[in-house]
Every structure is written in structure tokens, then in C-alpha cells.
Amino acid sequence: MSGCPAVRVLRVVRSVSGDRAGVADGMVPNPGERLPFRGFPAPGSDSDDPAVHADLSPIIAATAQWLTRAYPACGGALSAVLCEVQARQAVTVAAWLRHPTSMDVALVGISGPGGAARLDRITGAGSAADADGQEWRTWVDEAVASWAACLLADPDLARRAVAALAGGDHTAGTAVHFRRLLAPDETDRRAAALLRHPDLLAPVAGLHRDQLLSRLAPGQGLTA
């Protein structure tokens, strides 16, 4: 039984868990349930549910899912888990940088993150998206996806981005680590060979790279 692929995957998921509900060190809560935000109203709805406006998790989950579909894992179930861990860590850093304060989070909850339409077009995933027809794509944040692509393709930029989070609203009072984003081992790199390929990521990374570099410029604080 210990050799069962599902058991091995579960052990890896447990081994990469960390603080902040596992986001910091790579935990993917229930890998079989890719969309923990199902049932939330569509972005821009009139719902007064504070959880919709106070939490970036729907955006992080949807944007990470878009990345792993656009740049799938190289290998089997274990590789898929490792690839998703890296995508979620990159998207988490990008989302925290893009929406650094509670006010920013509230605003994107009200206005909506924009969706995956342009991302699907530039990566050639438009027809697949039409066939998919899933509402989760409306939760994808194009700028966050672009920033995450930049971080996955450029280790130095990823280190700068994580360092910039220190002392911000999302990390206050909590030690956070993004080991699989910042220091992937050989197994991580093989699993995410497409997800970390600079040339493949270039069309997505280039969309909002200048904004990311501006945010990370010396003296630039994490403000709206």
C-alpha cells in the first residue's frame, strides 16, 4: 500500500505544508478539490458577504489553476502536486504585492479581478476555455498571473518580491517562507519545467512586468 501513487502524493503534500494554512511552504489543501471558492458570487456582484471582499484566496486559487493548466506539470500525479505548489506560491506572492492592503483587497472584491479572457487568447487557450465554460475563470487576475510568471521565470526577481512583503499587511506578525518558489530542488524543477520556462512564460510575464518592476523599485512601499 505504501507504494501506491496516491499515498506518495499525500506524503509529499504533507511534507511541504507550512504556516499560514500551508500557503507559505507549499501546502495544497485537498489537491483533488482545485476550486475552494465554488459558490462565491461572481466578481462585482452585490453580495454583502465580507468573506468575499476580505480574502484573496479565490483569486489565488483561480490564477494558480490557470497557470497550471496553461503550463502543465511534466510527469504524473506527484509532479502535478509539486507544480501546483510552485504556482500557488508564486501567485500568492504576486497577489499580496498587487493587493497589499485590506483596502486593496476590498476593492478587488467589489470590482472583480478581470478574468482570464486575454490570457487565454495570448497563450492560445481560447478554444479550450470556451469548451471549459467554468465560472472559475472570472476569478483569474491577469496582472497577478503576469507577476507570478515573472517570479517563476526569474529567481532574483522572486527573492526581491518576497523580501518586499516583509512588514506588509499580509505578513504582519507571521514568519512566511516560499521555499519551493525561491529554492526549488531538482524534482521541483523537473515537475515545473514548462511553468518555469522563461521563453514560454514571456507572453504572460510581459503583460505587466513593468508594473511589477515599479512596485519593487527602491523606496517604493507596499501601498495602493
Image (cartoon, rainbow, N blue to C red):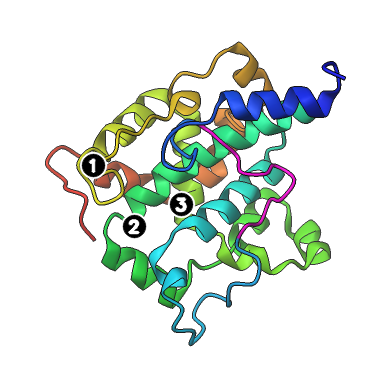
Q: Which secondary structure is most common in the magenta stretch? A: loop
Stretch in magenta: 26-36
Label 1 near label 3: C-beta < 8 Å? no
Q: CA distance from mark 1 to mark 2?
A: 18 Å
Along the viewing direction, whichever of 12 and 211 lies nearer the viewer: 12
Against 64, is 166 above or below? above
Nearer to us in this view, 39 or 114 = 39
Q: Residue furthest left?
A: 219
Q: What residue sits right under mark 3 in the picture? A: 144
Disc 2 to disc 3, how far (Cα)?
A: 9 Å
Residue designated by label 1: 173
Q: Residue 95 at what x, y percent from top left?
A: 41, 51
From the top left corner, tell me how far across and down residue 149 is, in percent: 51, 40
Residue highlighted by disc 2 = 99
Relative to 129, does residue 210 appear above or below in the rendering?
A: above
Image point (88%, 20%), residue name: 1
Q: Earlier in the sequence, mark 2 or mark 3?
A: 2
